Image: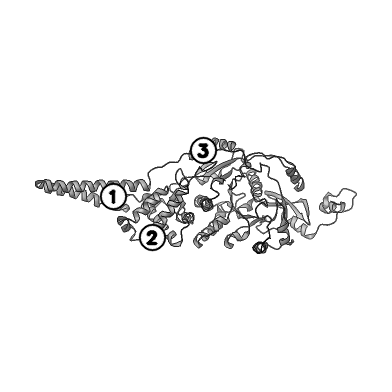
């Protein structure tokens, strides 16, 4: 850098005594610097890039209270999105805010271990004026159904609800409506759907001659639709998905924990073992968010979020989603802010996120985009249009950003968008890569949560109740047949036999055996309430 450039990059106050005043910076730089000069607590993202130079005294930040106004982290593969998540998670944890991260490729576990001060890290720290210190952060590791390195995360079928389950099973609108009817019936009759065999048992019952009578008042379930649902469940199980549903069910309040010393816990959901099942893990992430929404109280605007939730590979959630599903996502994102939860969607381009959802995301970190094809060019132009007025030629900047650089705009402390700022991001202080699997397993088993969730439990639920009912029906029928035989063989005791038969017939014809509406109490059903997504939690 030349002497004149050095002087231009320095602030006027930094000029040595006896030296003339430094040339004034461009008005655009001054405006950007003023836009990020927050007085309250904030996260430090990096230093401004302007005209090819990094200006370390112009720090780009995001106010801590604005993290629950949601955000988007986007960019092409390999541009540094994961490291940005790690950087933000570290600073949130340091300020006492719990964080949830989905680790799809298995390289986020390093957040729990101190980083390594290599040459590139030291160079980056100098560029952005960062006091870099190798630091590990408190973390808990989870795995869907226990597949992989982590504490098992399970949900009951009842809690998961018909809307999300339809997305996982890839049902059409008609089939989704029928599944909703099945859930409604189970809720009303107090039949808990804990795992897949419970749901299969209820579907099978409702398509039987006896079960069809149960749905007459609220609509029917066609044999064809029931067959599709049953086949989908069978295929789902054949892919090894059944461990994800069952008990003990994961309590999402675990995600709100802080560690000793006040740092927020970073909850990492390890997904490498199921990364080939995008419908499943993306929908499970939505269940976690919907369950939090269902349980958390309203808190309004807060000094810092209760939780920041990073929704990685967000496009998978929106692919082939029904209008009802998209409406539920939009409403959840809009309303969960007042419960103190911030949601960041992570994907490649803003066009991956529906407009109604994108409009709720106040903070933007856009990494580089590629423009190799006509579709790439179209996506680039669409991305530029989603930013407020900018002092940059964003089409040029977005295609020229290096790894670990991004275009940023956030909400100021007053809730107004800040000027667009090209930024060289800070380096994470934790390990930028996976920890050793043996060390990860050791950390999982040492967790206080491991004993609570490690072993699956199969208690009495819909399947057991229906099976017991069927066995009782068979026993009652056998008793009835025996009574008839006895009546024929002992005519002088026909009256008594008839009386016995009447007792048996009363039992067989009673609600205990003829109708699930009377065979199980409805108290459990009355306790079940469903949220926007149709998710539920009984007895929380």
Is the Cβ of the residue at disc 3 closer than 8 Å to that at disc 2? no
CA gap, disc 3 to disc 2?
A: 43 Å
Choose the circle earlier in sequence order: 1 or 3.
3
Q: Secondary structure at mark 3?
A: helix
User: Is residue 145 shown above or below 180?
Assistant: above
> Measuring 35% from the left and 51% from the top, which residue is drawn there?
522
Q: Position of residue 254 (x, y in %)?
A: 53, 43
CA gap, disc 1 to disc 3?
A: 40 Å
Badge 1 crowding class, 10 Å Cα cut-off, few under 14, some 14 to 19, many 20 or more, is: some
Number of residue marks:
3
Is the Cβ of the residue at disc 1 closer than 8 Å to that at disc 3? no
Badge 3 crowding class, 10 Å Cα cut-off, few under 14, some 14 to 19, many 20 or more, is: some
Q: Which residue is mark 2?
A: 224
> Measuring 74% from the left and 46% from the top, which residue is drawn there?
124
Q: Position of residue 300 (x, y in %)?
A: 57, 53
Q: Position of residue 360 (x, y in %)?
A: 59, 59
Query: Quadrant of the rendered structure where residue 416 is?
Result: bottom right
Q: Residue furthest left?
A: 492
CA gap, disc 2 to disc 1?
A: 29 Å
> Measuring 53% from the left and 57% from the top, which residue is drawn there?
329
Looking at the image, which is closer to me, 31 or 185?
A: 185
Choose the circle earlier in sequence order: 2 or 1.
2
Q: Which residue is mark 1?
A: 512
Choose the circle earlier in sequence order: 3 or 2.
2
Looking at the image, which is closer to me, 329 or 321?
A: 321
Query: Quadrant of the rendered structure where residue 116 is?
Result: top right
Looking at the image, which is closer to me, 330 or 69?
A: 330
Q: Secondary structure at mark 1?
A: helix
Which label belongs to residue 450? 3
């Amino acid at each position: 850098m030349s002497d004149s450039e050095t002087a231009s990059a320095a602030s006027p106050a930094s000029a040595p005594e006896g030296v003339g005043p430094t040339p004034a910076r461009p008005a655009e730089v001054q405006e950007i610097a003023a836009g990020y000069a927050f007085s309250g607590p904030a996260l430090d993202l990096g230093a401004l890039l302007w005209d090819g130079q990094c200006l370390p005294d112009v720090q780009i930040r995001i106010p801590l209270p604005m993290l629950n106004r949601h955000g988007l982290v986007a960019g092409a593969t390999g541009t540094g999105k994961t490291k940005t998540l790690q950087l933000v998670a570290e600073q949130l944890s340091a300020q006492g805010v719990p964080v949830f991260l989905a680790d799809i490729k298995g390289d986020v576990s390093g957040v729990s271990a101190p980083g390594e001060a290599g040459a590139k890290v030291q160079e980056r720290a100098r560029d952005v004026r960062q006091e870099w210190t190798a630091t590990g952060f408190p973390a808990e590791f989870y795995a869907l159904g226990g597949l992989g390195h982590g504490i098992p995360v399970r949900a009951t079928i009842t809690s998961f609800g018909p809307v999300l389950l339809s997305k996982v099973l890839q049902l059409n609108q008609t089939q989704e409506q029928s599944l909703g009817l099945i859930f409604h019936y189970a809720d009303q009759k107090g039949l808990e759907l804990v795992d897949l065999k419970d749901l299969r048992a209820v579907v099978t019952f409702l398509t039987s001659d006896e079960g069809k009578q149960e749905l007459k008042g609220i609509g029917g379930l066609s044999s064809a639709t029931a067959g599709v649902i049953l086949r989908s469940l069978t295929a789902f199980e054949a892919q090894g998905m059944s461990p994800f549903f069952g008990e003990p069910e994961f309590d999402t309040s675990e995600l709100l924990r802080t560690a000793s010393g006040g740092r927020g816990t970073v909850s990492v959901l390890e997904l490498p073992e199921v990364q080939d099942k995008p419908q499943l893990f993306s929908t499970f992430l939505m269940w976690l968010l919907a369950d939090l929404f269902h349980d958390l109280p309203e808190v309004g605007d807060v000094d810092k979020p209760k939780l920041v939730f990073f929704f990685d590979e967000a496009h998978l959630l929106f692919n082939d989603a029904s209008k009802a599903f998209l409406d539920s996502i939009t409403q959840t994102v809009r309303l969960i802010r007042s419960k103190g939860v911030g949601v960041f969607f992570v994907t490649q381009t803003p066009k991956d996120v529906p407009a109604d959802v994108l409009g709720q995301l106040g903070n933007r970190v856009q990494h580089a985009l590629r423009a190799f094809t006509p579709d790439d060019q179209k996506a680039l132009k669409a991305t530029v249009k989603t930013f407020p007025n900018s002092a940059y030629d964003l089409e040029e900047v977005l295609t020229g950003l290096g790894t670990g650089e991004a275009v940023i705009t956030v909400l100021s402390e007053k809730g107004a968008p800040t000027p667009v700022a090209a930024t060289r991001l800070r380096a994470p202080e934790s390990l930028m890569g996976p920890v050793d699997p043996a060390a990860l397993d050791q950390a999982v088993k040492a967790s206080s949560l491991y004993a609570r969730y490690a072993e699956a439990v199969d208690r009495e639920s819909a399947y057991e109740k229906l099976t017991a009912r069927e066995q009782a029906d068979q026993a009652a029928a056998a008793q009835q047949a025996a009574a008839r035989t006895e009546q024929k063989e002992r005519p002088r005791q026909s009256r008594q036999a008839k009386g016995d038969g009447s007792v048996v017939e009363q039992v067989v014809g009673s609600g205990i055996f003829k109708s699930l509406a009377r065979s199980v109490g409805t108290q459990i059903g009355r306790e079940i309430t469903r949220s926007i997504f149709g998710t539920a939690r009984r007895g929380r």
